[in-house]
Amino acid sequence: KKPKRRKRETDEANDESDEVAKKHKSILSKFEKSSKLAEAKSQQHEDEAADKEEEEEELHDLEPMPQPAPVPEPIYEPTFSTLPTWLAQPTTIEASKTVPFSELGVDATYVKKLEKQGFKNALAVQTALLPMLHPGFDQHLGDICVSAKTGSGKTLAYLLPIIEALKDRAVPILSAIIVVPSRQLVNQALQVAEELCAGTRIKVGTALGNVAFATEQKQLVKMRAQYDPKRAQELNEKASQQYQTGLMERGGPYDDLKKMSLGHVPKYDSGVDILICTPGRLVEHIEHTTGFLLNNVRWLVIDEADQLLNQNFQGWASVLMDAVHGETRPEFMNARERMAKQVRDANSAWSVALPQRQVIKVVLSATMEKDVSKLGTLKLRRPKLVVVQDASTELQPLETEDNVFELPSRLEEFAVHVGDGANKPLHLLHVLLSFVFAEKHEDADSSSDSDSSDSSSDSSSDSDSDAGQVSAASMSQQTGRVLIFTKSTESASRLSHLLRALMPGFKNYLQTMTRALTADASRKLLKSFSSGTIKILIASDAASRGLDIPDITHVINYDLPTSITSYVHRVGRTARAGKAGQAWTLFSKTEAAWFLKQIAKGDS
């Protein structure tokens, strides 16, 4: 029986070894499969690498890479403008257009006044402005910018509708402010305004620094006592608070309050309806004149705007806009303004119904400024641009960087080369004797044939031959009037002495106008020149803008202007209102390049 048991144990051991062998076999078979796959992948990589090595590299010369055929680009036409629409698309008026004043809605009284002054028809700029400004301050049809050459009648165009709207006023209220860059322009605008205001109660005032500041203050603002116990108590309490804090301001309404009787307050009234002023003096009154308020201003005129905007003048534009559009100080508010402030402060629904202050702004210039940032300081509302131009002149696009310049259509321009400039006075004398005050006989005619660019000896001989022909008696019969421009006051004075020495016959008919003259002296001088008593007026550049002297036949640039704009304003003193005129410019060898390129050829 024992052998059988061993056999059974042996069979069991064999069975166990078979099972182990089967397990090992399955594992080995898996290993073999994975090994074959790895070998196959390795062989595949080797074959691919061998194929790449067998490929031959192509060699190329240094040739440009092939490019696709160029696609033609359409011409770029922008659908927008770099300027606002009102600047890019102005309203143009022909310079030759004239319309009777009666057809423009002008009151019959003023039509008769204008006819007596020799104005029967309105000029181009007047035909454009009068209909826009005639509705008065009851309607705001938008602010107006005007680009019109000098001598086109801009002053009358804005003064006439303003004075018509105020003609029935009995009590002065500051309603219009006209800002101009120089004293001469203030006096000229004042003369036009006074002629139109004759027979009315309209009061026109000026602020230009020709009198003491305190005197101007009394003319512009009138103070009176008003009985108002409640208001007096309020002001006294505020004054006490300021006194206790040590912040009591000098001057102002609280100083005037001390002068009042019990229960009375100072009341400030305007002394003028229309104020014509220079920007610097206007700023002084806004900041230092007690009771000088602009809350009733309805018209604001900026004349010669290009010069005013290019010069700071104490930041006049910002100060003026704050005074016109800002809120009135509480101590100066009237009852209506105090009530409106209470409604606004309470955030009442009625605040939207409060009337807004309407100020019609008129901006005028011979060379309209297109710098939007500068025009933006004026806070224009719904502005329009009106451009007055000759029918034969195509308006240049306002998108260009350069300003648009236009000269009077009947202006003739001449240039005289004066060599090194040593004999410039003799060349000037030759122009005066041969072309301005030429006598109507053979001697004068023969002298006019000489060339202005001859040598100094020829010029002096011509001048000497002409010297005996022009006497004081003959000068009195001359109809020509000449305005000579110099670069400075010193140059003007020196030239005046030279001409008197070279030509004694000019002595009683030659005068000099500079900034040194007082306002009264300037007014008398311009009046004499306008009437023809003075035939030759020598002026510095300060007088080159806005001078509206009728019948100037010649303008002579003795000293070259410093810019194209200055040239335009100088020569614009002649050929005004459709009349003929001549402009002469003397230039030396060193000035020739700039003058011929910028002025003569107009390559600016």
Image (tube, rainbow, N blue to C red):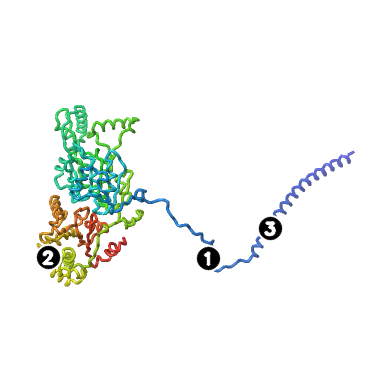
Residue 315 in view, yes or no: no
- Residue type of the residue flagged with mark 2: Val
Question: Residue farthest to the right?
Answer: 1
3 vs 1, front mark = 1
Foreground pick, 449 / 55: 449
Q: Quadrant of the N terminus?
A: top right
Q: Quadrant of the C terminus?
A: bottom left
Place of residue 12 in the rendered image (x, y in percent of width and height, measured from the top left): 83, 41
Mark 2 element type? loop
2 vs 1, front mark = 2
- Residue type of the residue flagged with mark 3: Gln
Place of residue 254 in the rendered image (x, y in percent of width and height, measured from the top left): 18, 34
Report the residue marked by disc 2.
470
Place of residue 386 in the rendered image (x, y in percent of width and height, measured from the top left): 31, 49
Report the residue marked by disc 3.
44
Place of residue 313 in the rendered image (x, y in percent of width and height, measured from the top left): 23, 49
Q: Earlier in the sequence, mark 2 or mark 1?
A: 1
Mark 1 element type? loop
The crowd level at tag 1 (other Cα within 10 Å; few <14, some 14-19, many 20+) is few
Report the residue marked by disc 1.
64
